Amino acid sequence: MHPKPADYDGFYFVPDPEDNDSTQFQYFQFKNAETRGQKVKGNDFGDLYHVILFKTNDDNVPILDENFEAVFSDPIVYAKNLSDMSIYGCILRKTNTSPNWIKDYLTNYADRVKMYLSES
């Protein structure tokens, strides 16, 4: 697992290719303030996050399972619990600009799946 930075905008959690019983966490932070945007207020429990979850079908093709928003005090704990169910994805702190990032992420995902299926 990559060490969690002090400040991050989101992270991917994916199956570890070297250990089927483990999950890799890859944290990211946007480079500029315009992309990062202003954080949308959550509540006393925690911040508001976008959650995108994937699972794989019998042919090992990634399938979009869920796309929702949730408040977490610690989204990493939530993601760790999903790894036991073979679910992986991306969690991103919600800001005034994050819906655009999510839209692009899902479009790129759909394009990659189409390319993968066309090559199969």
Image (cartoon, rainbow, N blue to C red):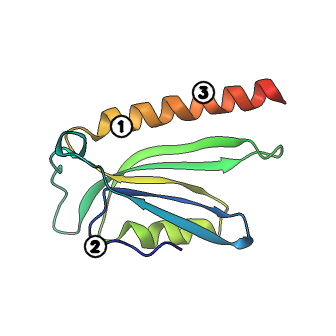
Quarter of the picture containing the C terminus is: top right
CA separation, marks 1 and 3?
A: 15 Å
Q: Is residue 92 above or below residue 46?
A: above
Q: Position of residue 41 (x, y in %)?
A: 15, 54
Label 1 sits on what residue type? Trp
Taking the spot 57% from the left edge, 67% from the top edge, the residue there is 24
CA separation, marks 2 and 1?
A: 22 Å
Label of residue 111 in the image: 3
Q: Are marks 3 and 2 in contact (CB under 8 Å)?
A: no
Nearer-the-camera pick, 79 or 16? 16
Quarter of the picture containing the N terminus is: bottom right
Residue at the spot of label 1: 101
In the displayed structure, does residue 53 sit left or right of residue 95?
A: right
CA separation, marks 3 and 2?
A: 33 Å
Label of residue 6 in the image: 2
Q: Secondary structure at mark 3?
A: helix
Label 3 sits on what residue type? Asp
